[in-house]
Every structure is written in structure tokens, then in C-alpha cells.
Amino acid sequence: MLRILITNDDGIDALGIKKLAEAALTLEEAEIYVVAPSEEKSGVGHGLTYRSALSPEERDFYGMPVKAWAINGNPADCVKAAYHLLFEENQKPDIVLSGINVGTNLGRDIYYSGTCSGAREAVILGMPGVALSYDNWEDQENYGDVVEMIRPLIQAFCEKAKRDTLPPEVFWNVNIPHLPLKEVKGILPAALSLHHYEDRYHQEAEGYFLTRTYPDGIPLAEPQDYHLLKHGYIAVTPVHIDATDKALLREMEEWPLVKAWGERG
């Protein structure tokens, strides 16, 4: 039996999470659990709820053969609460799938994204996590061929999870182009593109709103997620949750202040 936990940040009623469950249900011997926010929680990052109570509410999920709950919290809350409250110690999920997000989560977005936080929280709790996002921000009701696109990728991750061959401290960030399946060029490993947009604020009557501008030309100069996606590839990025700069850590040992304190001992 393959036990899959699904969450998202667009809310349990979003179309993207329905598509993700459809893809997961095509896998053999898959037992699907959906635990998602009761309302949209985009951009909440890895926020946790601890000053108020969480109240899981069991829900029907589009008539699908899955067990589903809505939670009055964030994506990280959903994964953490599901792990501790809904599963027995010897029946934890084999893998957590988060998404499918409306719009992409590329580069720096992984720090703001509730979708990515669902996958990251899975890894923190010792489970493999995969975040999936779809480049349909300008066409939000259209998920095209996304189920067919992600099915083999999900299957590959799930098979590795069952064999326990996925690295323990990594979540996977997947971005899918909004193209017909026949026009997708392939699946490629991708580095994070950290400088492909610029954030600005503009003033309206109510106050200041955050806006984002993107470059006009998109050369495929480096294997980065934004550039690969815009050139028709599914971009897959392994994101290590240990953000320590190990090389700089060793360099710090030579700092005069550090050495001076060391010599005092």
C-alpha cells in the first residue's frame, strides 16, 4: 500500500488540488489523504498556528475515494497536524505532495510559498515532500494536460519513496509549463533562479500593493528553473532544508575574533 498525503496553499476547494488527487489516484495501491487549508493561504511561507486552536473538519472531496479534512491553518499546519493527529505511529504517509499551485514557485518564491512549505514541513517530519506548481496564473481555470504531465513524475517519486531511496533532507520543487503535453520538451533538473524578477510597491487609494516585474527577454543561458520553464521544460529542483553555508562556516574559524576567544580556552 502506498500512503500519500496531499496538501496545498490555494485551499481545499481549489481546482489544482483536485487535479493532483486525480493524478495520484492513477497509481497502483494508492491510499490518498487530503489535508488542506479551509481557505486560500498563498504567500504565508512556513507560518505555523500556535496562538489559536486548529479544528480539522472532515470533508467530502469531489466524490473521490479519498479521506479529506479541511483545517483552519496554513499548509505547514496541515502537514504537521495530519502527521501527529491523523496517522498511527506505524502508518505515516510514504510521501507528501503539495499543490498543484495556481502559478509558479520559482527561485526566491520557495521562501514565500505556502505550497513549498507543505513539502518542506514533510521533510522536517521525516517524510519525502514534493511541491508542484503550474504556470497558469493568467489562465487559472485551465489546467490543460497537467494530470498527464505529472503522472509519470509522481510515480517516479512515489516508487523512490517506497524504496526509501530519496535523500532525507531535501524537498523537491516542480514547476510545470502551461503548454499542451505534446509541446513540453522534457523534464530537467534546475537550479533556483534567484534574480529573474524585481519586486516593487505601487500606491492606490487603500495603500501600497506589491507588484512584480519580469525581464522581457528570456535567454536559456543557465539551467535555472525560470529559464527552463519559459523554454518549455518541466523544471525540478532539489532544495536542501539545511541552509548553512558550510564553506563559510570553516572560513569563520580563521576570523581574528573567533581565534582570540579560542585561545582564551
Image (cartoon, rainbow, N blue to C red):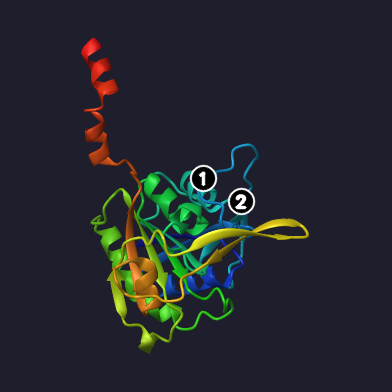
Using a 10 Å C-alpha cutoff, classify the residue at mark 1 as few (fewer than 14 neighbours), some (14 to 19) or many (20 or more): few
| Residue 185 position (above or below residue 73) | below
Q: In the drawing, does residue 186 fall left or right of residue 83?
A: left
Q: Residue furthest right?
A: 205
Taking 55 as reference, is 123 left or right?
A: left
The residue identified by callout 2 is 56
Disc on the earlier residue, 1 or 2 = 2
Residue 226, how many percent across, how many down?
Answer: 39, 69
Circle 1: element type: helix
Kind of residue at badge 2: Pro
Find out whether the residues at labels 1 and 2 contact each other: C-beta distance under 8 Å: yes
Please name the residue that numbered disc 1 is placed on: 85
Q: Nearer the viewer, residue 245 or 59?
A: 245
| Residue 64 seen by the camera | no
**Residue at coordinates 54% horizontally, 46% vertically from top-left?**
47
Residue at 46% over, 71% down: 215
Would you call the spot at circle 2 few (<14 residues within 10 Å), some (14-19), or many (20 or more)?
many
Residue toward you, 185 or 216 = 216
Rendering coords of residue 257 (x, y %)? 29, 21
Residue 78: % across, % down: 53, 51
**Quadrant (top left/top right/bottom left/bottom right) for the N terminus:** bottom left
